[in-house]
Amino acid sequence: MNRTLKRIWDLTVLCVRGPGGKVGILYCCIILGLNLFEIYLSMKMIMWNKDFYSALEKYDASGALYQIGVFAIITGVNAFQYLVATYLRQLVQIRWRTILTNTFLGRWFADKAFWHLNTDESSALDNPDQRISEDCRIFVDRLTGKALDLFSAIISLSTYVFILWKLSDFPLEIHLFGETYYIRHYLIIVAPIYVLISSTLTHWMGSPLMRLNVIQQHREADMRFALARLREFKEAVALENGEKAERKIIDNRYLRILDNWRARINREFILGLFTRPYYMTVLRIPTFLAFPAYLAGHVALGGLMQLGSAFMRLVTTMSWFIFSYRELAELSATTNRLSDFMEQIDEVAAMPPPVEKAGSNDGSYHIKGLTVCDPSGRELLSIENLTIQPGDTVWIDGPSGIGKSTLLKALSGIWPHCRGKLAVPEGKTVFSPQKAYLPLGSLAECVAYPEPPQDMEKIRELLQLVGLNEPRHEEQLKKATDIGDDYRLSGGELQRLQIARILYAKPDWIFLDEGTSSLDIEAEEKLYRLIRTHLPDSSIIVIAHREPKGLGTYRHIDLWQNRADRHGQEASTEPDAVGLALA
């Protein structure tokens, strides 16, 4: 519990310290002031109960009508107070959710944590998209609701105790074993005992809900992920007739939701066996407990209703924990999910870079003692010493599975399972992945990615040069909205778009990982020649199985590995370590 409270405090501090967060504190102070005014109105309502029922007891029609008018005024003012407080609370939620979301997005993108967290197979992190979009909203909503209510409850508690103390200044007479006992202010004693017993029962019966809520969030997120993944790869599923297999995967995840859901509703039913009768009787029990004072003649009917109203408000205030239990359970689960997420992001930020990077003194790209491994630690390949001169063209080749794409990730600095040293020259560098990426945005934004588009004529010219000059491409280019589902690009078209992106960026160093693998040899050669023509001074490093014709003179680096053990053959005379051959 203490750990959860500390985490709630830490996340709240993040909200307050962000840009505009302190304005939220000002709004909270105003809300608290309005809540105090609500306490004043409730005191007026307590007095109203006495006056109204006293008028009824005396058959005073004019007095009763007058009190109905008073009731209408109190109700109207109370409603206005509530609406203003709710409006301000929502403004606080907007500010603090924006700050919290920006904080998590900033840390998620910093140091490429979004990549490293996803590559760690042993990590318990799941669905960071849900944590950023949904959990930030839930946390701020529950925090601003329950925290302000708690402060108001603490303040109103003393007020109602004082009122009830004054109203219950009469003894309760109890005859027990031939003795007579008198208990003064007995309603003040009964109220906390009544609520304490009720709160203890509520927590005992409902505590498993916190764990079940966490599990439910995990399993709901797992199903959303499966559905989103199906949408992403719907073409492959349709071509391979994988509907039954995908349905089975989704059904299994839904069954896991149902299992936990049933456990949740069973627990909520058990909790409801107590809390529902409590909710229904909490407004009447106070009157029953004050009834002996009425029978003893200590109070009239109006006084009885006043006592009942005061006692009811005291018990209701003290029952804050019972009324808020489900929301508190959700706040606790959400807080722990967000804090775990933050801690894993911080762990990534604290990790030292796997490869030592330094500036190059001679303008060349130097690789020294680079060893690349898979996540299990098995060595894939190693490069003892390699220098790439400015303007060079290098073709890196090797058998499938040796780690050519992983080598590109290691050089870019995003692969954690490697070691070595790099001397990187100044200038703009582009690492083009094997799977071309089509970001959300217009076609012009896709070409200029990750920079904003500034030269539309240049973008149009590049699209024509790479072969994306059909009418549908021109039509999409004129649109300023995101590319929709009706605009599809084949694998080859995506790679043409990626080449256009490189030409638009004009980098000094280009690393291409199978950047033309979906194209035929003629189209590949044409695009390579296009790159070399438009970027004659750029260094181009191509990872591909095919010879990069069209790039002119190049160096061939052939990565090889003794793989005899994989085929059950005798080991060759070549060394087991991955080598590097220059041709």
Image (cartoon, rainbow, N blue to C red):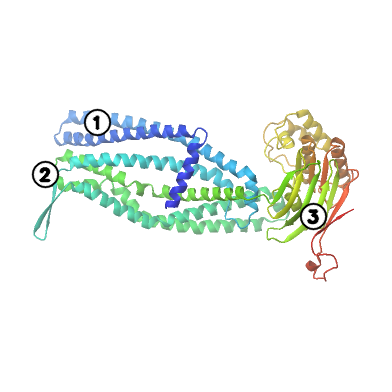
Q: Residues within 10 Å of mark 2 (few under 14, many from 20)?
A: few
Frontmost of labels 2 and 3 is 3
- Return the x and y of residue 475 as percentages of the image width and height: 75, 32
Q: Who comes first in sequence, dot 1 or dot 3? A: 1
- As measured in the structure, the alpha-carbon distance from the residue carrying label 1 to the one carrying label 2 is 27 Å
Frontmost of labels 1 and 2 is 2
- Is there any visible trace of residue 331 in the rendered image? no
Vertically, is 309 above or below 546?
Answer: above
Name which residue type carries label 3: Ile
Name which residue type carries label 1: Ile
Q: Residues within 10 Å of mark 1 (few under 14, many from 20)?
A: some
User: Dot 3: what SS?
Assistant: strand
Q: Which residue is mark 1?
A: 68
- As drawn, the label of residue 537 is none
Q: Who comes first in sequence, dot 2 or dot 3? A: 2
User: Dot 2: what SS?
Assistant: loop
Residue extending furthest front?
361
Position of 172 compared to 436: left or right? Answer: left
Q: Which residue is mark 3?
A: 383
Give the residue at x 27% y 41%: 158
Q: Residues within 10 Å of mark 3 (few under 14, many from 20)?
A: some
Give the residue at x 16% y 35%: 54
- As drawn, the label of residue 297 is 2
Name which residue type carries label 2: Gly
Which of the pair 21/35 is nearer the observer? 21
Residue extending furthest left?
178
Position of 163 compared to 528: left or right? Answer: left
